Image (cartoon, rainbow, N blue to C red):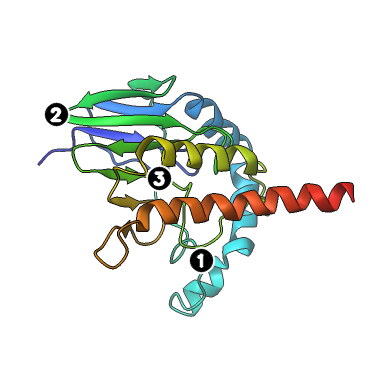
Amino acid sequence: NPTRAIRTLHRSDPRRPGVLLRRYDTTAGFLEEAVSENVYAGTAMSRRSDYQFGTAAAARAHQGSLPGLSQITPKGTVNLPRPTHVIEHDQTIVIDGVEVFFQLTPGTEAPAEMNNYFPQFRALWLADNTLATLHNLYPIRGAQVRDAKAWVNYILDLVHRFGAQATVAFQAHEWPHENTAEQPNAVREYLLNTAAVYKYIHDQTLHLVVS
């Protein structure tokens, strides 16, 4: 089937296929942030990311050295098409017959980012806002420092909105999490545990700073 729409969840390294789209959704601020990070500082950040992710070592070892977020950082052509639709606030939109809830999460893993919920499938798409490991709050490659407090609040908002309905959560890195007979609340616990990690780091950092 032809590609009908693409959603860009955040600004890091916007690689898009050379296809004609009827719809290309991005979060508010995406275009500005994509340019500021990847055009103004892209060369320096790419060079520093080789040290952060061990790109050369991974290639020499046939992907034997992994950064935790994925196998290795992607390579290929980078382009930046102009979005056809910009999501300015939390809302539900029907795209090609699929109902999609958009939750804006600025200041989390990226300055402009968003999560989605698909009620027909009871599925949460969480971009880079949840992982099977701890994401960077202070990326050494030069990306902006993340707002841990805002990150927590957006995850807890998802728990409040969809924690009782969602049966599967998936994201850009690593494997999905789903409710099972053995773990009927796996998705909700996954979200709460993720929020707890960033909450702890935020609170303990401030505690040590002011102690």
- Residue 160: percent from left, percent from top: 43, 37
- Please tell me which of labels 3 and 2 falls first in the chain: 2
- Residue 18: percent from left, percent from top: 27, 38
Mark linked to residue 68: 1
- Residue displayed at 30% across by 45% down: 166
Q: Secondary structure at mark 1?
A: loop
170 is higher (above) or lower (below) than 31 = below
Residue 147 in sight:
no
196 is higher (above) or lower (below) than 4 = below
Near-viewer residue (143 or 38):
143
Q: Which residue is mark 3?
A: 126
Near-viewer residue (94 or 167):
167
Q: Residues within 10 Å of mark 1 (few under 14, many from 20)?
A: some
- Quarter of the image where one finds residue 123: top left
- The quadrant in which the N terminus is found is top left
86 is higher (above) or lower (below) than 173 = above
Q: Nearer the viewer, mark 1 or mark 3?
A: 3
The residue sitting at the right extreme is 211
Q: What's the distance in space between the residues labelled 1 and 3, CA to CA?
A: 17 Å
- Quarter of the image where one finds residue 37: top right
Residue 142 in sight:
yes
Q: What's the distance in space between the residues labelled 2 and 1, CA to CA?
A: 36 Å
